[in-house]
Image (cartoon, rainbow, N blue to C red):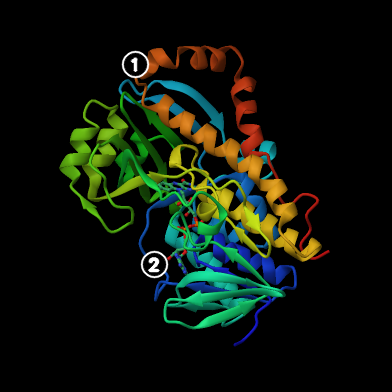
Amino acid sequence: MSKPRLLICGGGIAGLTAALCALKAGLEPLVIERAETLSEVGAGLQVGANAMKVMAGLGLDEAVRAAGHVPEALELRDGESGRVIFSVPAGEAGRARWGGWHVNIRRAALQQVLASALQHRAPGVLRLGAEAVDYTEMADGVVVELADGECIEAQAVIAADGIHSALRRRFASGKHPEYTGHTALRVMAEADDALRVLVPDASIAWAGPKRHAVTYYLHDRRVINFVGVVEQAAPVPEGWHTEASLAEARAAFAGFAEPVAAILEAASEARRWGLYDRPPPSRLARGPVAVIGDAAVPMPPFMAQGASFAMECAWASVWSLATAGGFAAYEKAMAVRGGRILETARRNGRFFHGKSLPALAGYAPVRLAANLSPGFIKQRFDWIYGYDVTAGRALDA
Ligand SMILES: Cc1cc2nc3c(=O)[nH]c(=O)nc-3n(C[C@H](O)[C@H](O)[C@H](O)COP(=O)(O)OP(=O)(O)OC[C@H]3O[C@@H](n4cnc5c(N)ncnc54)[C@H](O)[C@@H]3O)c2cc1C
């Protein structure tokens, strides 16, 4: 049995970021990922300025920015009329305010930046085709059991194995994730000049009723990412592989403003992703084992913060381990923040779908506030994007 100092289970955004943090901190990480290859599929992700500070700390912010696209604004619009409810400058103004770029990027491109950096900095640290099934705490560490019966011993374990985490079961009630009744329809459209004129260069949430869409450009504004969330009672599986029909997506968003209709018209395929939720565990760490990212707090996508929070967790958990020899400081730093992001995302989900009112009426107070005091709306984003998990938590001190 080999003995890496830190075993990271899961090679998603959380696990790869944690491995890079561990290298920076001088730890010896090994990442095990159950997939045989790192997936090339996946739609777009918004990486908030809070997460870009983690990328900057790892020397990867320019690589992420170059592979993605920085929108000019973050907007909320009424889906049907297209009217702007509020618009917050992103781009250079966002960077000045929040200390990092807001980057929209293909998930596969982000994973590629992280995996390439890992391969370059420590070849062999990522082991594919290895699935963790359980762990046993020992007097001086942890033994993780793999699906094929192999055991890997480590001094500490970071579980970054997603919402269905096999390793988090010891942390809480053991509740399984449940289908939320919401399904995301994910679409990409090639952007030609006509579409680029029609669709603003912003990350836009187009709100309700009973559905909402998020649109933004990806690399070089050549592709537009569309995520439309609809209410659908029958459970739908998670994953990037379930096909949906474009006719269904167009019908679900019939009556939405012209830019949304034009994106759906230009698209060539749609996929479906059921949204699942489960209560966060009461603890983020237990002895020498910590849970991070979706394994810790699975985020509904209504704040676009799941991957960003996963990166914050990665930094904080490694810092905690490297500086204090355990995960207590990580838990202290991230439990409250994770809960706050989760609650805000859930509230946004209810709000976006405008259960009882047409979205524009429901948002009238927000719209009024945005018009009277644009600074008020910007401030509402400061706690999320302005946060810097790296501040005062140097990894290579
Ligand atoms: C529709 C939608 C839109 C979203 N949009 C955004 C957005 O704009 N911005 C944002 O920040 N977030 C967004 N998210 C959320 C984001 O995708 C997730 O929060 C994020 O990917 C979580 O990363 P993770 O590494 O924790 O988990 P995952 O991405 O789930 O990675 C877990 C990894 O662990 C591996 N694994 C699982 N079990 C095991 C095991 N037992 N042993 C070994 N390996 C294992 C898996 O194969 C996988 O590679 C969105 C999510 C959805 C559904």
Residue 351: x and y in percent read: 43, 25
Q: Classify the position of the N terminus by image quarter.
A: bottom right
Does 68 sit above or below residue 120?
above
Q: Is mark 2 within 8 Å of ligand 1?
A: yes
**Lateral position of residue 124 relative to residue 325, left or right:** left
- Between 1 and 193, the residue placed more toward the observer is 1
**Lateral position of residue 61 relative to residue 38, left or right:** right
Residue 94: x and y in percent read: 62, 37
Identify which residue is drawn at 45% across, 82% down. Answer: 149
Q: Which residue is mark 1?
A: 356
Q: Is mark 1 within 8 Å of ligand 1?
A: no
**Furthest residue toward bottom:** 1
Amino acid type at mark 1:
Ser
Whichever of callouts 2 and 1 sits on the residue coming sooner in the sequence is 2
Q: Quadrant of residue 252?
A: top left
Tell me how many marks there are. 2
Does 247 sit above or below residue 138?
above
Amino acid type at mark 2:
Ser
